[in-house]
Amino acid sequence: MYHVTVFDDEGKKLFDEPLQAENDVEAREKGLALLAEKEYQNHPYRIVHTSGRLVSFNSHKGKAPK
C-alpha cells in the first residue's frame, strides 16, 4: 500500500489519498498519473510506501528573497 500527498507552497495539504500498487515502480507510475489527472503535477508532492519508504518526491520551490 502506498500514499500520495500534495501540498501547497506553504505546506498545507491539498490532496491526500491511498494508492494500491504491487511495487514501487507501479506506485510511481500510478501516482504520477493521478497527479496529472488532478492537475497537481507542478505542486510539491510525495509518494510513499506505508512503511515510510519514499518512492517519488517533488519539493516546494521556496520563497523568493525580498
Image (spheres, rainbow, N blue to C red):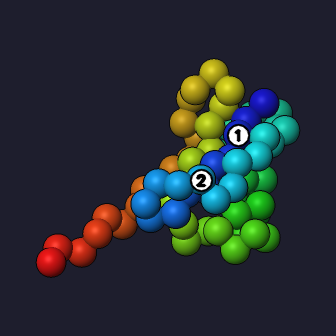
* Location of residue 38 (image quadrant): bottom right
Asked if residue 13 is positioned above or below residue 65 in the image, the reply reads above
Closer to us: 49 or 23? 49
User: Which residue is painted at 36% across and 66% down in the image?
Assistant: 61
**Which mark is in front, 2 or 1?**
2
Query: To which quarter of the image does residue 41 belong?
Result: bottom right
Q: Judge from the rendering whether residue 10 lies leftward or rightward of residue 24; answer left or right.
A: left
Pick the quarter of the image with the C terminus: bottom left
Q: Residue at 63% of width from left, 21% of height from top?
A: 51
User: Residue shown at 57%/48% (left/top)?
Assistant: 46
Q: Which residue is mark 2?
A: 13
The residue tagged 1 is 3
* Amino acid type, callout 1: His
Q: Where does the image place residue 57, in percent across and percent down from the top left?
A: 51, 50
Determine the residue located farthest toward the left in the rendered image.
Answer: 66
Q: Position of residue 17 (x, y in %)?
A: 76, 46
Screen quadrant of the N terminus? top right
Circle 2 packing at 10 Å, graded few (<14), some (14-19), many (20+), is: few
Earlier sequence position, callout 2 versus callout 1: 1
Tell me the element at label 2.
strand
Q: Secondary structure at mark 1?
A: strand
Task: Name the amino acid type tagged 2.
Answer: Lys
Q: How many marks?
A: 2
